[in-house]
Image: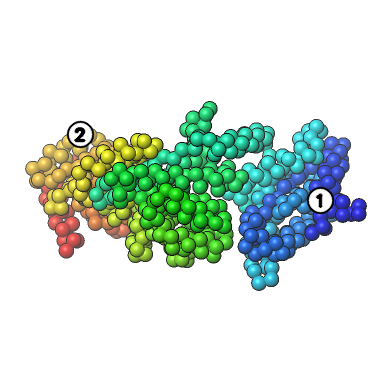
């Protein structure tokens, strides 16, 4: 009876009561001999899904294996305890240096991530670990366990599969999270939760074709709170189920009102948490929202992130197919930043892909972002999916994406997220705008881009070439040059070699990758022969011209460059 009172029945490890007793003893020894006591709080990431998908019997076997692995890593004087469920603790008494803990924690992290082979199943798990050490004699065993637990929670919030040390700020943060959780519950029961909408623009016509529903919390003290401030907490506490249902119901009702006002072809997309998707009955929740609002299923889109299939992929894909059977459309959100498994993409019954804003931010000047964006658009179209680009903030972004075949554009360049009352006005104004052409440039027009950090050089070159009938685009900034290239069909570029932001050859190296059909010419009075020669050999530049120039000769050179461009198109 005494043994059972102090040990965990499943794993035979010490339980919390025995751990607290040993912490108290270890603290006394550490104080007496000037040593350090360390406590690790270990949480198994994703264990709940093991129980839900494979059953509690398999889950228990995993916990026993975790206990065995932990026990095999430690010294005889250390203590491994099972606190509760999938949470364990390791007590490290009599340490000489705090750094001694680091190697132990890293060994534990590595060892617990080795796949678990239970019956015929291979289970991949990781661990999040909180670390605390004795700092003063006033801390009780309960204090240390609480502090280590807070540090472990922080490790999970930072992405899991890592370890974090306790700091006094975590205690303050924990109190804040408890308060916020209670306030969120009050918000769900009142009218503080609001839904804003951000239009999605058809890249071909410039018309608002769809909109994304975005949750906002009108906090009585803090004002409008964005999702990033409270959605992660709602997912952690389970409040995301009620929050998600509230947003879904509101979005469906608002869309019916909008369609009744004459915008019959508009659709609305609603973000769905992986937690919602894995919960039994989610399809029924969607069905009820559609029935109560009267919205047709074809005008409702559900946005899911790629990581939704990381756990229990079969169940998630099954749920998505059930939603498709309802007639609802599926959108893969933030594509390229999550799991990004093409094998799962093949199985996803998706209608759209949204390219994450992180790729759009520098798409007009970064060869990698441009290549990824162009590749995703091509791949999606071959899979018969539409493509949405998030984070479109400039006219250059919009022009580049339109030229590369992106279907829908979303971002601050068109509209910030707005309340439904403002959305009606926006849609009315947008409807009366004239349809825009995909490219405002005249196809037969010869566009010449001049880039030089000296304005007098730009003016002199403009005077030289104006008589030849070129449309001249000019700038002293490399960044603006990228924007001009995105907005216009430029055939020939003349750039100085020595500029503050980057050299001409470096600039042309990026341009070649993004706009390979341009003819690129360096015009400079300073010659770095090695870099220029390499750029010519690599095809980054077509020709190198020197300053000062002869007007007649440079006009002939540029005329030849335009002829060369024409020959490349045939």
- The outermost residue toward the right is 2
Q: Which x, y percent locates residue 164?
A: 65, 44
- 53 or 185, which is in the foreground? 185
In this view, the residue in front, 110 or 141, is 141
Coordinates of residue 17 in the picture (x, y in percent): 83, 46
Q: Circle 1 — which element?
A: loop
Image point (35%, 35%), residue name: 422
Q: Residues within 10 Å of mark 2 (few under 14, many from 20)?
A: few
Mark number displayed over residue 15: 1
| Residue 136, picture quadrant | top right
Query: Could you give the CA–CA distance between mark 1 and mark 2, rounded to whole angstroms?
Result: 80 Å
Mark 1 surroundings within 10 Å by alpha-carbon count, few (fewer than 14), some (14 through 19), many (20 or more): many
Quadrant of the drawing holding the N terminus: bottom right
Q: Provide the residue designation for mark 2.
A: 456
Q: Are marks 1 and 2 in contact (CB under 8 Å)?
A: no
Please name which of the two marks, 1 or 2, marks the residue nearer to the observer.
Answer: 1
Residue 398 vertical placement versus 173 (above, below):
below
């Amino acid at each position: 009876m005494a043994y059972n009172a102090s040990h965990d029945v499943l794993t035979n490890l010490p339980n919390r009561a025995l751990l607290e007793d040993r912490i108290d003893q270890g603290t006394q020894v550490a104080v007496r001999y000037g040593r350090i006591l360390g406590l690790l709080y270990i949480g198994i990431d994703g264990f709940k899904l093991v129980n839900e998908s494979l059953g509690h019997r398999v889950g228990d076997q995993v916990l026993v294996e975790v206990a065995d692995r932990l026990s095999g890593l430690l010294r005889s004087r250390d203590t491994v305890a099972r606190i509760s469920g999938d949470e364990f603790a390791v007590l490290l008494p009599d340490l000489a240096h705090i750094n001694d803990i680091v190697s132990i924690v890293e060994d534990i992290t590595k060892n617990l991530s080795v796949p678990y082979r239970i019956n015929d199943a291979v289970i991949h798990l990781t661990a999040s670990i909180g670390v605390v050490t004795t700092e003063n004699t006033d801390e009780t065993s309960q204090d240390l366990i609480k502090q280590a637990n807070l540090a472990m929670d922080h490790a999970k919030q930072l992405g899991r599969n890592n370890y974090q040390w306790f700091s006094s700020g975590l205690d303050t943060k924990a109190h804040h999270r408890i308060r916020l959780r209670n306030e969120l519950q009050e918000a769900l029961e009142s009218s503080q939760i609001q839904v804003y909408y951000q239009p999605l623009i058809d890249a071909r016509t410039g018309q608002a074709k769809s909109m994304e529903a975005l949750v906002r919390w009108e906090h009585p003290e803090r004002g409008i709170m964005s999702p990033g401030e409270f959605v992660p907490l709602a997912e952690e506490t389970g409040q995301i189920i009620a929050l998600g249902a509230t947003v879904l119901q509101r979005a469906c009702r608002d869309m019916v009102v909008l369609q009744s006002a004459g915008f019959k072809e508009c659709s609305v997309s609603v973000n769905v948490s992986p937690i919602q998707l894995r919960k039994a009955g989610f399809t029924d929740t969607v069905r009820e929202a559609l029935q109560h609002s009267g919205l047709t299923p074809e005008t409702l889109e559900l946005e899911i992130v790629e990581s939704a299939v990381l756990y229990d992929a079969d169940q998630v894909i099954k749920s998505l197919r059930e939603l498709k059977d309802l007639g609802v459309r599926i959108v893969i959100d933030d594509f390229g930043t999550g799991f990004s498994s093409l094998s799962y993409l093949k199985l996803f019954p998706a209608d759209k892909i949204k390219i994450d804003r992180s790729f759009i931010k520098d798409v007009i000047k970064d060869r990698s972002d441009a290549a990824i964006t162009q590749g995703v658009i091509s791949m999606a179209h071959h899979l018969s999916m539409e493509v949405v680009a998030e984070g479109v903030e400039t006219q250059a972004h919009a022009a580049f994406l339109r030229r590369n075949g992106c279907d829908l554009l979303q971002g601050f360049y068109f509209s910030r997220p707005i309340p439904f009352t403002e959305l009606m006005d926006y849609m009315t104004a947008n409807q009366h705008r004239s349809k825009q052409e995909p490219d405002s440039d005249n196809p037969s027009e010869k566009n010449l881009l001049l880039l030089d950090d000296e304005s007098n050089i730009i003016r002199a070159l403009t005077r030289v070439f104006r008589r030849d009938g070129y449309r001249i685009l000019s700038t002293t900034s490399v960044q603006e040059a990228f924007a001009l290239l995105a907005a216009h069909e430029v055939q020939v570029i003349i750039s100085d070699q020595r500029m503050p932001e980057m050299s001409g050859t470096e600039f042309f190296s990026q341009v070649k990758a993004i706009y390979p059909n341009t003819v690129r010419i360096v015009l400079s009075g300073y010659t770095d022969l090695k870099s220029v020669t390499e750029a010519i050999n690599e095809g980054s530049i077509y020709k190198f011209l020197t300053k000062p120039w002869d007007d007649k000769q440079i006009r002939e050179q540029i005329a030849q460059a335009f002829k060369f461009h024409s020959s490349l198109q045939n």
